[in-house]
Image: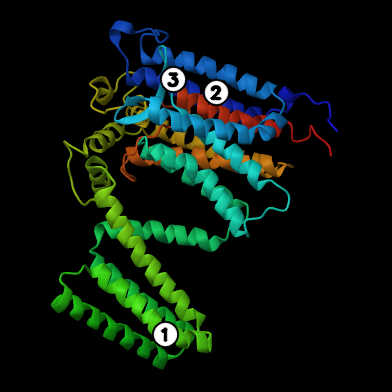
Amino acid sequence: MKRSINIWRSLDWITVFIYLTMIFFGWINIYAAVYNEEFSSIFDISQRYGKQIIWIGASLVIAALVIGIDSRFYLFFSYLFYIAVIAMLVLVLIFGKEVNGARSWFEIGGFSFQPSEFAKFVTALALARYLSVKGRTLNSYKTIFTSSVIILTPALLIVFQPDMGSALVYFALVLVLFREGLSPYLFITGILAILLFVVTLIVDNLYIYSILVILAILIHLIISGNPGLTLKGTLIMAIIGGAVFSVYRWGVGAIRVEQIFIISLLLAVAAFTYYIYRFKAYLILVIYAFLLGSMLFIFTVDYSFNNILKPHQQSRINVVLGIESDPSGSGYNLNQSKISIGSGGFTGKGFLQGTQTKFKFVPEQSTDFIFCTVGEEWGFLGTSFVILMFAFLFTRLIIIAERQRSSFSRIFGYGVVSILLFHFVINIGMTIGLVPVIGIPLPFFSYGGSSLWGFTLLLFIFLRLDASRNEYMV
């Protein structure tokens, strides 16, 4: 049964006010980033700041339309939207316009749009629809698998464009799965995988493999409390490893370090099969699985870094990790970004007074590096204001998500938080050198119609769902 309520009165106006503040502050910073004295009017549509006010006006219309549509519409058509956006991501690979080496834009007349920006909120809707089915839990491998397919399908299609930055955003939706009951052990495994990824890039593989083996031995010793068994297993591993090395060294030919460790580990598992089965020593099996999985992961990281990533992407990662320094090449953007933000001091140089901005030292100042303009012209106070606004927004959205009566609305709400949080952390992180430069916009601040409309749809669909949380009574 439907209750008669005033949707506009039920709307969370605090969040709406934050949204309006962000897009206004973003607009004036876009104006500062690409300011042209010959076209000084902020409403000049021949310039980016003039075009941005058009995108802002259109986003307000979109927000009003989203609020005016019945909330059940987003639930019932979520799968259809998902299929449509997957089709667009396939078609853009064939008919799309190539920009900066990525075929990710449709151009119709003089209008261009990027399907990947709209795929974010659609994927969050589809995931919420799937997980909100009564009785469906993340204790089931089938549920985990299907959820992963929903998340990874658009991500993989975007990788083929290629647009690695946009593709990585979808992995943020894993946070939704944890909120809905996914095992925390998988979260810990994910954190360890990230650490191992970083370590693999900066430490020689021989040392990593050696440390992993020693760690596995210590874990077994502590948990089993049987020094004799641990010693026997270590000796068997050492003998098998020595034999594998000898065979390849003097018989077959050259062999890589990881091959010695992996082959030795597999043969050791075979040697311990009877013991594991006879005494149900599943601890040994778990430790072997940990070792083998870690080693295969290291091999995958090495292969992907050297054979899949492009040279400029490798350089960006190396610059962030401190492996190489190239202030005039791959590290130029990061170097200029740091100079720009640092030069702003506590209060900034003042509106339209940024020298780094005026002389265009920082590339993509109005899009990926808009935070540099904030830092230079508004200083520490300005950047703190932006960060606090986002912190307030995330806090507010989590509160709204937790008060939902519908699991669909709650799950979608956490999808909104995950996507916006990922953009916020990565965008600001890359401008100050904490993460590699991967090129994703700062929500509600960066120039661009597709990104602003995508974020507006993402946010206001959730606000519409929240406004109607008391509308339908079962």
In the foreground, 197 or 354: 197
Distance Cα–Cα, label 2 vs label 1: 64 Å
Left or right: 164, with 55 as reference point: left
Q: Residue furthest front?
A: 252
Left or right: 139, with 294 as reference point: right
Residue 20 has which mark? 2
| Disc 2 element | helix
The amino acid marked with disc number 2 is Leu
The amino acid marked with disc number 3 is Trp
Residue 447 in view (yes/no): no
In the foreground, 423 or 243: 243
- Counting from the top left corner in percent of width and height, residue 27 is at 44, 20
| Disc 1 element | helix
- Residue that label 1 marks: 272
In the foreground, 452 or 205: 205
- Counting from the top left corner in percent of width and height, residue 194 is at 39, 56
Distance Cα–Cα, label 3 vs label 1: 65 Å
- Counting from the top left corner in percent of width and height, residue 447 is at 40, 23
- Residue that label 3 marks: 27
At x 72%, y 53%, the residue is: 135
Distance Cα–Cα, label 2 vs label 3: 11 Å
Q: Quadrant of the N terminus?
A: top right
- Counting from the top left corner in percent of width and height, residue 216 is at 39, 77
